[in-house]
Amino acid sequence: MRKFDSILVANRGEIAVRVMRTAQALGYRAIAVYSEADAKAPHVRMADDAVLIGPAPVGESYLDMDRILKAVKDSGAQAVHPGYGFMSENAAFAEACDKAGLVFIGPTSDAINLMGNKAEAKRRMIEADVPCVPGYEGEDQSDAAMMKAAGKIGFPLMVKAASGGGGRGMRLVEKADGVADALNAARSEALNAFGSDELILERAIIKPRHVEVQVFADTLGNVIHLGERDCSVQRRHQKVVEEAPCPIMTEELRVRMGAAAVEAARSIDYRGAGTVEFLLDGNGEFYFLEMNTRLQVEHPVTEMITGLDLVALQIQVAEGRPLGLSQEDISLNGHAIEVRLYAEDPAQDFLPVTGAIDLWQPATGEGVRVDAGIETGMEISPFYDPMVAKVIAWGDSREIARHRLINALKETALFGSTTNRSFLIDVLGREAFAKGEATTAFIGDEFTEADLAVAAPTFAQAAMAAVVQFTIERRQAFANSLNVSPGLMDWSSGGHLLTRYVYASDESEMDLTVNPGRDGAYTVNHGEDELQIEVIDCGETTARLTVDGRREAVMYSAPSPGVLDLSVAGQSLHFRNRIAFAASAEEAVGGGRVVAPMHGNLLEVFVKPGDEVRIGSRLAVLEAMKMQHDILAEIDGTVQDVPAVAGTQVAADDLLVEIEAMEEEA
C-alpha cells in the first residue's frame, strides 16, 4: 500500500478542475500548478494550494518536467495526477516521479513508453493476437522503405506519427504520387508536436466507426473493461462527439472487443485507467488503432452509464488497493452523449480562435453535466488547446440523451469568442446521427461549405436584438437620470421616440427602427416589414420576449455600448449598431495584406519580396493551439514585403506578407 494525502494535479483548465473535484471530495489535499497566463483561472482558485511554474508557453510551464517536479517538492505533494494531455503520457515524467518517491497516478513508465509509440505498440499487439490494421511499422524510416511499403499496402493509406495523437502528424494518401508530400508534412508536424518524426503506415479503413474500450487494471492482476464508447464524429481526426454505449453494439461484439482490450492491457502488465481504441468496419470486424495510457477526455459518458467515478478508481489503484470490481459487476445503464465545445470557427475550416469570454453561462437540468475550467471575464489563450468545455447528457434511452443534449447546448452561452456550439447542435440533429449511423466520414459526408457558413441574421432575430439593445440602453439611461420617471423614458414632447439600429453582416445590412409603446410593447420596422415585440422580462443575461405572439427565450451579452451578442434557439449572433461607430472603423483589411489569424509561432516562411504567387499559394506555416495552419495567398500577385520571420512569435493581425495584386489583362 502506498498511502498519500496530497495530490498535485499537473494540468490546467477543465482537466484540473475535474480531477481536483474528486480528490477533494475524497479528502485529499489538491494542489494546482499554473502558468502566468492562468494566474486567475478557476482551477487555481479551487485548489488547496497552487504553485506558479512559468510563462504561458507550454514548453516553459506545463511541459517543463523540472518545473513541475520542483512544484511538487515546494508544495509537499506526495502524489501526482497528470490529468489527460500534457505530461500524462510522458514516460520520462512517470519515471522521474517514481525515482523521487512520488506516487504517479497512472500506469508505469514502461507501459507508457511501449504504448506511446504506435509502431512498437502495434508490434506488441500483433504478438498478443489483438486484431490490427495491415500496415508498416518498421524501424527503417527512409523514404525508399516507406514508398516500398506503401506500394505493398495499397491505397488509400494513412501516414501516422508513431508518437502522439489528436490527428497531428496524420495524412490520408489516395494515390502513390501523394506519398512523398504526405511523409514530409507528417514528419514536420510530428517533430514539432511530439519531438519525434517516426512514422507508421496503415491501410485506410474507409468510413469505419471509431470505437474505444475503457479498461482498468489494479496492481494485483485484476483487469476489466467498462464497456465501449463511440467516437466516430471527428474533424481533422479529432473527436467532436462521443457516446456510450456504441449505437450498433451487440452483446456478442462487446464481449469480443472487450476481451481484446483486456488482453491488450494484460499483455503489457498495465495499471490504472487506459483506453484501447479500435476501428470497426461495416462487417463487424475491428482492428487495434492505439492505446491511450491515461484517462480520456470523453470518460464522463462511461461514468454516466456505469455510475463509477473513474478518477476515484485511479486514486484507489495508485494506492495499491484492489479494484474491488469484477467484470460481472459492470452493468451499463442508459445512454450518454458528450460534445466538445471548442473556441473555433467552423466556417473557417474549424480554425481555432482566441478572445475574451464576455459571458459563460453553462446549462443545467435533468441528466446534464458540464465539465469546464472557464468563467466570465477570462481570456481564451492562444497557448493551449481550443477545447473550453464539455457538455454531456444522460438518458434512459439514446433518444432522450440526444434531446437533452440539444436543449443543454441551446441553453449554454459562451459570448466573446466564436465557438462550434451551433455546429454541434446541427450534428446532433442530423438524421444520420439520430439513427446512429455516423462513421468517421460523417462530417465530410453531411456538411457542405454552405452548411458551415455563418448564416446572416433574419429580420426577426435582428428585431429581437434591437429591442434587447433598446431595453438595455433605456435601463442605463434611467439609472443615470434620477429625475426621470420610468414611464417617460420612451417619450419626447412630440410623442414616442424612434430609435434607429443599423446592423451589417457580410451579405446584407438591416436598417431598423424601434418604436416603443406601453407596457413593454414595441413595433420594429425594416422597410415594409414590421414586427410586434413584447418584452416579458429582461434580466442581466437572459430575456423573454413574444414576437408576433410567439414566445422566445434569448441569452445575451452587451460587452460595450452599441454591441450585442445574442443566442436564439442555439444560434449565436453578433450585432453591432453602426450608428454608434465611425464608418472608418468598419474598413476591412485588403486581400493583399496577409495577417496572422491568431497568436502563435511562425514555423516557416516560404516567400520573399519579388516572388509571384497565386491564390492558394503557401506563404507560411503558423503553429497555434496545438495545430499547424497553412497561411495561403488570397490573390494573384507579386510579394512586396515580408515582415514575418520564421521562428518568432506573432500576434493576431500582425502583418506577415504584403502582396501587390496582379493587374488584370485587358
Image (cartoon, grey):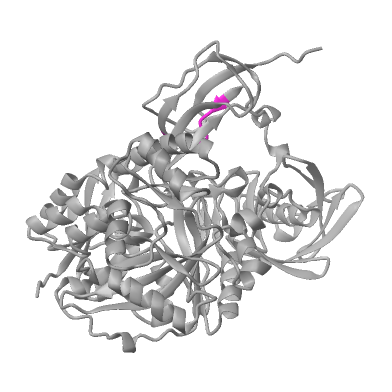
The residue drawn where x is 56% and y is 54% is 420
The region drawn magenta spans 594-600
x and y percentages locating residue 13 in the rendered image = 36, 56
Q: Is residue 116 magenta?
A: no
Up the image or down, 23 lies above or below 86; here it is: below
Q: Quadrant of the N terminus?
A: bottom left
Q: Is residue 278 left or right of residue 560?
A: left
Q: Residue furthest bottom?
A: 328
In the picture shown, does residue 179 fall above or below 310? above
Quarter in which the C terminus is drawn: top right
Please name the residue shown 26% across and 75% down the image.
313
Residue 369: image location, x then y, percent: 46, 72
- Number of numbered labels in the structure image: 0
Q: Is residue 149 visible?
A: yes
Q: Is residue 632 above or below residue 35?
A: above
Residue 114 horizontal/vertical position (percent): 23, 56
Task: Estimate the x, y position of residue 514 in percent, counting from the top left.
Answer: 80, 52
Nearer to me, 12 or 601: 601
